[in-house]
Image (cartoon, grey):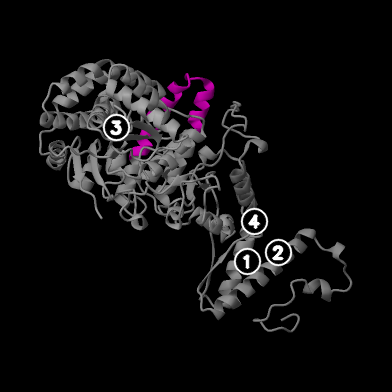
């Protein structure tokens, strides 16, 4: 009105300067000039975007770029302008990981280097696309060199903070209540562990669209990593619709509340193990404090904002716990328990193998499966199992589990189908060519449960590929731990020792690449090969969208997959169908999970044998 323009007309952003000839630029506050410049550019971007969206009849406009990233004011201005010009019919949207979009096309067509002979055609190349893996931790809490500098409540210098923290700190400060500076200053300076108040009903990510929202938590974003070494498991029947998690806690409020509660209650016990793994030093205690705050903040965020991490199942939340432990400097929390339990179980393995050898084939097959189910009770991720550890040694618990194993039929029981298949192969002098076996826990689980089953398949002429975790998670055995353990078992089992030696020789012949399935011939090695590889996982579940290169290669020619353990065959992949025969084995150590999936109860057993699907 002052300059005679209609209310619907936007004047020049620097109109006052041009109209007031008595003042020069030096007479204006540089901050005001900067604000006007940002507003002018933002309005210009918004108007161009609006006009293009109107032309193509679009209702949602996604903005990205460094001019926007970390600048709440710019996002608010764009949102206002789009809403103004479209009369509320269009929306301005901002992606949490928009900075990665520019490289998306390259990664979607990722191909190995020219030296690779593994990926030969377009269909194989699609299976080898790089995988986007979201890490939800904040960033390192200690110095880049890995040294921890005790500073009371984890105060960090600017140089010790990750780029994520620095980036988000700028965002908090710029949004730190321009309309209420005192509150913003308090939020920026206080200890993150004391930040528990959230603005009711408002996502923290709304920060980027409205500068008046208050960001109270010190935990802000995940980081999208790209790992070109991870592959999709080739034996999935329907890769496009594959979903590892059986329970989607982002949608099921009752399940979300229960599982977050379980994990929250386990934090003290997890910290106790973590502390013991590093000598209970003051430095280790500081790391524990960091883990409590970091993981606890994630759990609180998920309770309040279940969609904040997108589709989020049990697989993801369990792996998040391991990520937080690693971020805080705990590389292997259960290392002490794993070593002692492996040693104890190895002492009785020779007697167990001798006992199995004395049985006829039908009885031996049942005893092998019962041994796997009984051994699977050893799981430090289960509160029920933790209570058992308090009341006996590993061998006492194993013997008790064998004697108390629920009578057949088990809750899920297709063992007879599996036994019939094995007996039929014996009668017709056939075999499985290659079995991929996903193993679970250390101690009695692997030694007294899975090793005898591995030995049985090797004796039948089946090549065995043992796939173990790439990184530690709970008391799950890792591939680097499994190899020396199998060598120990080989000292009193020639089948296992011979299998490892055959695998070593075949590796040498193929120059370090996992060989194809070997045909049977008069010159075949005396023992079938026993390969030990990483599965690409860093959590207690199994996401077959992201497996290691060796595992993807090993799948070629495999005609049997064995999924052992609650995390790999019930928490995840219970409903997954494969292009080969599959055996899923687990003892259920959680009442709610048993009730949810098959209306069962705690310590129910699952033996699910499924024939290959076309």
Q: Position of residue 361 (x, y in %)?
A: 13, 30
Using the numbered discs, state the Cα–Cα distance from disc 3 to disc 4 in whole angstroms.
Answer: 47 Å
Q: Earlier in the sequence, mark 3 or mark 2?
A: 2
Q: Picture quarter containing residue 375?
A: top left
Mark 1 neighbour density, 10 Å: few (under 14) some (14–19) many (20 or more) = many
Residue 449 location, quadrant: top left
Give residue 178's mark: 4
Mark in front: 3 vs 1: 3
Cα separation, mark 1 vs mark 4, equals: 15 Å
Residue pointed to by mark 1: 77
Taking the magenta stretch, the answer to whether it contains residue 494 is no
Q: Earlier in the sequence, mark 3 or mark 4?
A: 4
Res. 532 in view: yes
Task: Point out which mark residue 383 bears.
Answer: 3
Residue 43 drawn at (x, y percent) = 66, 71
Q: CA distance from mark 3 to mark 2?
A: 55 Å
- C-beta proximity under 8 Å, tags 1 and 4: no
The residue range painted magenta reads: 262-290
Can you say whether 463 is above or below 27 in the image? above
Question: What is the quadrant of residue 553 in the picture?
Answer: top left
Q: Secondary structure at mark 2?
A: helix
Residue 38 is labelled as 2
Please state, as top left, top right, bottom left or bottom right, where the C terminus lies in the image.
bottom left
State the residue in front, 267 or 337: 337
What secondary structure is found at the residue carrying circle 4? loop
The numbered mark, 1 or 4, whose residue comes first in the sequence reads 1
Q: Is residue 564 left or right of residue 275?
A: left
């Amino acid at each position: 009105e002052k300059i005679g323009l209609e209310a619907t007309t936007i004047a020049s952003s620097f109109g006052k300067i041009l109209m007031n000839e008595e003042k020069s630029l030096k007479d204006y506050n540089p901050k005001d000039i900067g604000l006007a410049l940002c507003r002018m550019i933002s309005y210009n971007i918004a108007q161009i975007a609006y006009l293009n969206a109107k032309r193509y009849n679009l209702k949602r406009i996604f903005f990205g770029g460094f001019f926007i990233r970390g600048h709440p004011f710019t996002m608010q201005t764009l949102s206002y302008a789009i809403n103004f010009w479209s009369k509320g019919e269009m929306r301005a949207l901002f992606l949490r990981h928009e900075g990665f979009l520019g490289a998306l096309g390259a990664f979607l067509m990722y191909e190995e280097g020219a030296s690779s002979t593994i990926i030969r055609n377009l269909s194989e190349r699609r299976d080898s696309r790089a995988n986007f893996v979201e890490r939800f931790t904040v960033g390192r809490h200690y110095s880049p060199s890995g040294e921890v500098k005790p500073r009371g409540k984890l105060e960090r210098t600017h140089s010790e903070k990750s780029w994520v923290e620095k980036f988000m700190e700028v965002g908090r400060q710029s949004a730190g209540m321009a309309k209420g500076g005192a509150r913003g200053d308090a939020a920026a300076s206080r200890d993150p562990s004391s930040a528990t108040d959230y603005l009711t009903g408002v996502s923290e990510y709304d920060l980027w669209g409205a500068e008046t929202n208050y960001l109270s938590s010190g935990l802000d974003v995940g980081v999208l990593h790209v790992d070109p070494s991870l592959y999709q498991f080739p034996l999935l029947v329907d890769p496009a619709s594959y979903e590892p998690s059986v329970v989607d806690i982002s949608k099921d409020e009752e399940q979300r509340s229960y599982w977050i509660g379980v994990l929250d209650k386990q934090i003290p016990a997890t910290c106790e193990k973590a502390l013991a793994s590093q000598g209970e030093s003051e430095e280790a205690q500081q790391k524990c404090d960091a883990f409590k705050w970091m993981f606890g903040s994630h759990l609180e965020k998920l309770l309040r904002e279940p969609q904040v991490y997108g589709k989020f199942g049990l697989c993801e939340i369990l792996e998040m716990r391991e990520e937080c432990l690693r971020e805080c400097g705990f590389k292997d929390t259960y290392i002490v328990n794993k070593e002692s339990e492996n040693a104890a179980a190895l002492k009785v393995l020779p007697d167990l193998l001798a006992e199995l050898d004395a049985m006829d084939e039908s009885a031996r097959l049942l005893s092998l499966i019962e041994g796997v189910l009984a051994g699977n009770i050893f799981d430090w991720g289960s509160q029920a199992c933790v209570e058992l550890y308090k009341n006996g040694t590993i061998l006492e618990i194993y013997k008790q589990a064998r004697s108390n194993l629920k009578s057949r039929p088990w809750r899920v029981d297709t063992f007879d189908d599996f036994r019939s298949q094995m007996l039929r192969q014996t009668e017709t002098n056939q075999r499985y060519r290659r079995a991929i076996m996903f193993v679970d826990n250390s101690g009695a689980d692997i030694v007294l449960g899975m090793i005898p089953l591995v030995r049985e398949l090797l004796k039948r002429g089946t090549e065995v590929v043992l796939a173990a975790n790439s990184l530690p998670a709970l008391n799950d055995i890792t591939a680097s731990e499994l190899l020396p353990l199998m060598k120990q078992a080989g000292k009193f089992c020639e089948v296992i020792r011979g299998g490892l030696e055959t695998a070593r020789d075949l590796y040498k012949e193929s120059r370090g690449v996992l060989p194809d399935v070997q045909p049977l011939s008069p010159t075949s090695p005396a023992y079938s090969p026993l390969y030990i590889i990483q599965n690409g996982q860093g959590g207690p579940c199994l996401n077959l969208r992201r497996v290691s290169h060796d595992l993807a290669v090993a799948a070629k020619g495999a005609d049997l997959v064995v999924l052992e353990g609650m995390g790999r065959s019930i928490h995840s992949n219970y409903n997954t169908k494969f292009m080969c025969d599959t055996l899923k084995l687990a003892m259920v150590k959680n009442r709610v999970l048993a009730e949810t999936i098959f209306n069962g109860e705690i310590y129910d057993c699952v033996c699910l044998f499924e024939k290959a699907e076309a």
